[in-house]
Image: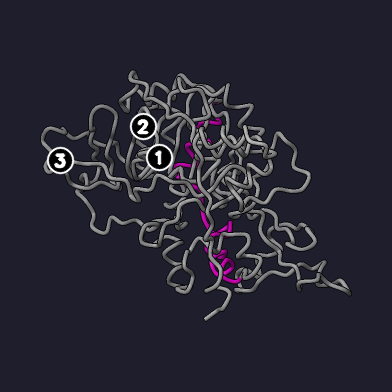
Amino acid sequence: MDEQESETSPERPIRVADASDLKFLLESDLPPRAVLNVLAPDIELPPDADEATIARLLISLVDPPRRNKLTQFNTIEDAVQLIRKSNKIIVLSGAGISTSAGLPDFRSRNGIYKQIHEKHPNLSDPKCIFDIKFFRKNPQPFYHFARALFPGQYEPTVGHNFIKCLEEHGKLLNNYTQNIDTLEKQAGIRRVVECHGSFAKATCTNCRYSLDGEYIKKDIFSNKIPICPLCHSSDEGPNDGLGVMKPNIVFFGEQLGINFHDTLEADKDRVDLLIVIGSSLKVRPVALLPTLIPHEVPQILINREPLGHFNFDIELYGNCDEIIQELCHRLGDGWTKICLPGWKPLTELDASKQSPAFKLKTSSGLESVEECDGANVDTDRVRLSEIIDPLQEAGPKVPEGTFLFVKPNKYIFNGAEIASA
């Protein structure tokens, strides 16, 4: 047993504040940095962090007002018309957009967290391997799984090509991706914000020396920990051993890049449509995006599961690729080029004739979040059984080539995470 595995886990009293908590603390004599330390003691701020940065962090710890659904938008045809008329679309994409490429997701029955648990059963929480404090003590578990995530092994999906098509039609404001697989760039999308970084660069944990991500590829695929060449060549070397080359992805406890905040600040008052694809929206600050833009901006969700902590106007549940191809078929010329060979338009079922009745069910039922603004912080104290999809038995499925409309605004496609009522 690895001693470091058993002794370290992200057991921290981080929580999301409500407005009264924050107001009380700000009206106290505590300076802003101390207030932040009370609400989120694990966030590692640089010593020179300015007041604007700290204020932004504090605001993000408060649950924003819940957006009300826009009642005039309900159907898949409404979604098509919104895409047609909108010219400043934000697409927020998560792991679900990449799974059809062969990339694992995190929370499903065969996802990364399940694999981590099987490989490192002594870890009390599989999210440990993405925690920066754990990584500094024991980076080996992370590099066991870095190979599966490393770019260059996968091809863009229908979802990525749809975002590229939006861009080609002059409709994409920006694609905010939570993913680190760089499939957006591989698809040719230019207007992309990599919210959680990527493998494109790697930085030494000791001396901050930076290299192209390809430098660490050989070590990762050989199940080795990549060591900093600068520290290794130094006569004295770092005090705590050789520096490790860590890919520039955002771990729990690390700050998000300023590019995310600056771009969102510029985009939030320009956007005219939000499309969320394949995300559980449990990762802050990205999860706050639907509440940060004006509430009168229409919102469409394309996802395998419902997100009970948000009110989307049109909700399309199932395999992302299938849903997007149906949308592109309805959009017509200039859009159908992204449809896979042999794909055929889907048939809508008559909901009144379906038995048993379909009932939407979230795959995790978790309302909490895992990260707070600027830093990845574990805020939901959940065990493995709660992280991994608890739908052990598949609910009723729509027949292949069909979909079902559930009034007023929900559609069930093949692959939706549903259960019988």
Residue at image location 62% in from the left, 32% down from the top: 27
Which label's residue is closer to the chain start, 1 or 3?
Answer: 1
326 in magenta: no
Residue at image location 23% in from the left, 40% down from the top: 402
Q: Farthest residue in the front direction?
A: 29
Determine whether, in the image, residue 97 is placed left or right of residue 330: right
Which tag is nearer the camera, tag 3 or tag 2?
3
Which label's residue is closer to the chain start, 1 or 2?
Answer: 2
Determine whether, in the image, residue 292 is placed left or right of residue 231: left
Q: Quadrant of residue 414?
A: top left
Task: Name the kind of residue labelled 2 in the image.
Answer: His
Q: CA distance from mark 1 to mark 3?
A: 31 Å
Look at the numbered discs 1 and 3 and tell me whether their residues touch, using CB distance below 8 Å: no
168 in magenta: yes
Q: Quadrant of residue 401?
A: top left
Look at the numbered discs 1 and 2 and tell me whether their residues touch, using CB distance below 8 Å: yes
Q: Which mark is residue 329?
A: 2
* Tag 1 residue: 339
Residue 12 in the image, given as x and y percentages of width and height: 54, 57
Task: Name the kind of residue labelled 3 in the image.
Answer: Ala
Task: Please tell me which residue lies in front, 126 or 194.
Answer: 126
Stretch in magenta: 140-169
Look at the numbered discs 3 and 2 and tell me whether their residues touch, using CB distance below 8 Å: no
Residue at image location 77% in from the left, 57% down from the top: 210
The quadrant of the image that shows the C terminus is: top left
Task: Name the kind of residue labelled 1 in the image.
Answer: Cys
